[in-house]
């Protein structure tokens, strides 16, 4: 359903339901769209891989330098499976009124 139709429908309903007019509907729809996009990417990992990814993030406390070389390699492999570049590009693309160039999502031509 296009966003304009949803916004109009909520606008009509807000006349009858008190407090609904103050809800930022477009922001809620955007947040839901981002959540669905993130879920699709996280679903590419197995439950064991998801647990391991969280363990590595906690162990590193946000810094790769706190991980051993083998843990860094394992983290890189998990992030590659997660396709973080495509996830972030999709998030920016959904928020931006201007379409993103494909090379930002998938890299330069001829690059694996």
Image (cartoon, rainbow, N blue to C red):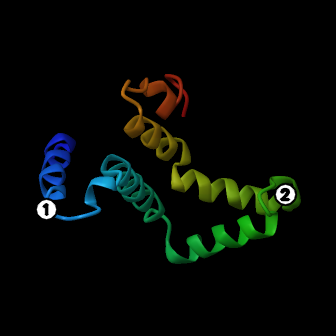
Find out whether the residues at labels 1 and 2 contact each other: C-beta distance under 8 Å.
no
Pick whichever of labels 1 and 2 is earlier in the sequence.
1
Seen at 80% across and 69% down, the residue is 59
Find residue 63 and report its horizontal and vertical position in percent. Answer: 81, 55
Q: Quadrant of residue 36?
A: bottom left
Residue indicated by mark 2: 69
Q: Quadrant of residue 73?
A: bottom right
Q: Along the line of sight, which residue is nearer the eye, 38 or 29? A: 29
Q: Which mark is residue 51?
A: none
Seen at 58% across and 51% down, the residue is 80
Find residue 105 and report its horizontal and vertical position in percent. Answer: 48, 34
Q: Is residue 30 above or below residue 16?
A: above
Seen at 36% across and 28% down, the residue is 97
| 59 relative position to 77: left or right | right
Q: Secondary structure at mark 1?
A: loop
| 48 relative position to 89: left or right | right
| 41 relative position to 64: left or right | left
Q: Dot 1: within a 10 Å radius of its alpha carbon, few (fewer than 14), some, or many (20 or more) residues? A: few
Q: Is residue 90 above or below residue 107?
A: below
Q: Along the line of sight, which residue is nearer the eye, 92 or 47? A: 92
| 93 relative position to 9: left or right | right
Find residue 27 and report its horizontal and vertical position in percent. Answer: 38, 49
Residue indicated by mark 1: 16
Find residue 102 and report its horizontal and vertical position in percent. Answer: 42, 27
Q: Secondary structure at mark 2?
A: helix
The residue mark sitting in front, 1 or 2, is 1
Q: Quadrant of residue 66?
A: bottom right
Q: Dot 2: within a 10 Å radius of its alpha carbon, few (fewer than 14), some, or many (20 or more) residues? A: few
Q: CA distance from mark 1 to mark 2?
A: 60 Å
Image quadrant containing the C terminus: top right
Seen at 52% across and 49% down, the residue is 83
Instruction: Count all numbered tags in the image, as a single digit.
Output: 2
């Amino acid at each position: 359903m296009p966003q304009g139709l949803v916004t109009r429908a909520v606008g009509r309903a807000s006349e009858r339901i008190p407090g609904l007019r103050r809800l930022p509907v477009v922001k809620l729809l955007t947040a839901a769209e981002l959540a669905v996009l993130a879920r699709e990417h996280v679903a590419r990992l197995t439950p064991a891989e998801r647990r391991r990814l969280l363990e590595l993030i906690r162990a590193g406390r946000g810094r790769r330098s706190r991980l051993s070389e083998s843990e860094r390699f394992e983290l890189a492999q998990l992030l590659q499976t997660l396709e973080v570049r495509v996830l972030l590009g999709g998030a920016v693309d959904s928020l931006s009124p201007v379409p993103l160039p494909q090379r930002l999502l998938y890299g330069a031509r001829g690059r694996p």
